[in-house]
Amino acid sequence: MDGWDQVAGAVENAAAALGPKTVVASCQYALCAHVLAAIDDRPQVYCPTLRRTEFDFMGRREPPADAPVLYVADDHYHDNPVDLMPGRICQPLGIVPIEGDGRILEHYRLSACLPRGGANN
């Protein structure tokens, strides 16, 4: 899909602002995989989904407990990141609208999900 360069740029900027221990996560296998490819797994991508995925076999279901998580969601998947990553407090950071043919094709929502005890950056 068009617009992954915009998503990648927004993710890279937001992750850098959250600190060097930041990881990225999403709620659905395909979205996790798209984000992983778009940012070349830098920072590392986790996929704390409700169902087992390939990310489980990579050891990438649960983000590290002390890491800030940049959570990426889109218009199709609305899982609450706090349900997927208990023990974190999540705050919206912004929305990346992807346009094509003069209309919005998709929105990507970015949230900062921090450990309740505070991130150790």
Image (spheres, helix red, strand yellow):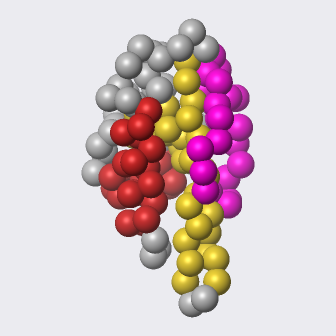
Q: Nearer the viewer, residue 11 or 13?
A: 13
Choose top left, top right, bottom left or bottom right for residue 41. Answer: top left
Q: Write the residue at 55% across / 71% down.
A: 98
Say whether residue 60 is visible.
Answer: no
Q: Nearer the viewer, residue 55 or 20?
A: 20
> Is 85 placed above or below 87 here?
below
Q: Which residues are magenta?
A: 74-95
Whole-percent x, y for residue 80 in the image: 71, 37
Q: Write the residue at 44% across / 33% down.
A: 18
* Left or right for 16, reference 81: left
Q: Nearer the viewer, residue 111 or 80?
A: 111
Q: Nearer the viewer, residue 105 or 91?
A: 91
Choose top left, top right, bottom left or bottom right for residue 100. Answer: bottom right
> Is 66 placed above or below 5 here?
above
Q: Is residue 21 magenta?
A: no
Q: How many marks?
A: 0
Q: Is residue 78 magenta?
A: yes
Q: Write the residue at 60% across / 88% down.
A: 102
* Left or right for 3, reference 93: left
Say whether residue 36 is visible.
Answer: yes
- For the C terminus, the image quarter is top left
* Left or right for 95, reference 69: right
